[in-house]
Image: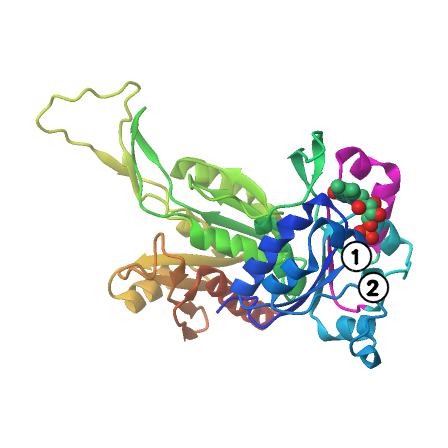
Amino acid sequence: MSLLTDKKILLGISGSIAAYKVADWVRALRREGCQVTVVMTESACRLITPLTMAALSGNPVHTSMFAAEAPEKIPHINLAREHDLLVIAPASAQTIARLAHGLADNLLATIALAFSGPVLVCPAMNSVMFQHPATQANLATLRSYGHMVLDPDCGKMACGEEGPGRLTDWEDARQAILSALAPQDLAGEQVLITAGPTRESFDPVRFLSNPSTGKMGYAMAATARQRGAMVTLISGPTALVPPPGVRYIQVTSAAEMQAQVMGCLAANTIIVKAAAVSDYRPAEPQPHKVKKGQAALSLPLVANPDILKELGDRRRTSANFPLLIGFAAESRDHLAEGNRKLKEKNLDLIVINDISGTETGFAADTNRVTLLDRNGGQEDMPLLSKEETAHRIWDAVIRLRTDNR
Ligand SMILES: Cc1cc2nc3c(=O)[nH]c(=O)nc-3n(C[C@H](O)[C@H](O)[C@H](O)COP(=O)(O)O)c2cc1C
């Protein structure tokens, strides 16, 4: 199951050359269990056929306010009432201007006026058109109405020009759709999240590390942002793209991570330590590549700082310390180890990750975690996607936050 399952999305397509790209968005939304209804302007119908969109969405496409079929249903009112979210993508300069001025001269614009739920506008046009003061003023007006406007990407466009105006990519649109549908119950929170592994260099080409991919920490960051938090993500080396809208700080070693965490501490209200920090580092990193040829080589190690413990210790002597959430990757004695770390590191909540299975822990897209909190609460979660797991963890954090007040 996805967070989008059973959500009803009304997709308004206007006359931009990028209209063909949202055909893929419809497929992606349906894969996640969304019900998608498409509304197209007259110009959009010249660029991509309603038939294509009907086939992909599995629903009739609406193009006219005065449709012959079922006129008693008053299409613009019914469509506006029946959906959770209105996504206008691509939004042409003309449609953006219509919406900004409250015009109701076609079906899409009239629905937008009659729609009381969240509206997401995804502009796509030539970069000169996008940067024109009229378009910028119209977008500012849409923002003032509470609509979410997803900035277009920069790059080469169909017209041959380069600049801002390309329709945003699906991943960013998906995050914005999730934000539009998520409760904003982390609004006002400043969240600091660490993620990924650290690398401890032995020589310029070799290092000690672990298989952490950062997926769980990045899911924590994306979902916190969706729920309205301001997020700082401090990440070790991963192959992941940081979620949109988060402040991103890249580090390599545990020492760098420690410096960044301690440097950012003051501004935050919640700290989530999801990084898999190397416990040890080579005692004497070599400035030059160590040549092969020796039959054996020993590598003396020294302990790295325990960042989570340091935070827990600071918390003992500091009033108004941020809520402290730790992660523990365990392959046995999960509960005993989790409880020990919860107390020893003075945490509010610990997320115990079972790394023994293939469906959980490092690299997997799913996870099965147990939460232990400082009040003695225990919650065993089922196998879920990392994104859903992250939402459940935030639910638990919000409950703790409420208990605290
Ligand atoms: C081939 C072609 C591509 C177009 N691409 C865009 C575009 O990407 N963005 C845009 O704002 N207008 C674009 N236009 C112009 C719009 O289609 C035109 O302004 C139209 O009035 C938009 O109407 P609508 O907003 O009701 O769909 C394009 C026009 C043509 C002929």
The residue pinned by badge 2 equals 107
Residue 127 sits in quarter? top right
Q: Secondary structure at mark 2?
A: helix
CB contact under 8 Å: marks 1 and 2: yes
Residue at x 87%, y 38% (from the top left corner):
133
Residue at x 56%, y 59% (from the top left corner):
27
Q: How many marks?
A: 2
Neighbours of disc 1 within 10 Å: few (<14), some (14-19), many (20+): many
Q: In the image shown, does 225 or 10 lie closer to the viewer?
A: 10
Label drawn at residue 41: 1
Residue 370 sits in quarter? bottom left
Judged from the image, the quadrant occupied by ligand 1 is top right
| Label 1, ligand 1: CB separation under 8 Å | yes
* Residue 219 can be seen in this image: yes
Q: In the image shown, does 276 or 29 lie closer to the viewer?
A: 29
Name, please, the residue furthest toward the left.
295
Q: Position of residue 153 (x, y in %)?
A: 66, 40
Q: In the image shown, does 261 or 240 lie closer to the viewer?
A: 240
Residue type at mark 2 is Leu
Q: Secondary structure at mark 1?
A: loop
Residue at x 86%, y 70% (from the top left corner):
66
Q: Which residues are magenta?
A: 115-144
Neighbours of disc 2 within 10 Å: few (<14), some (14-19), many (20+): many
Q: Position of residue 117 (x, y in %)?
A: 75, 68
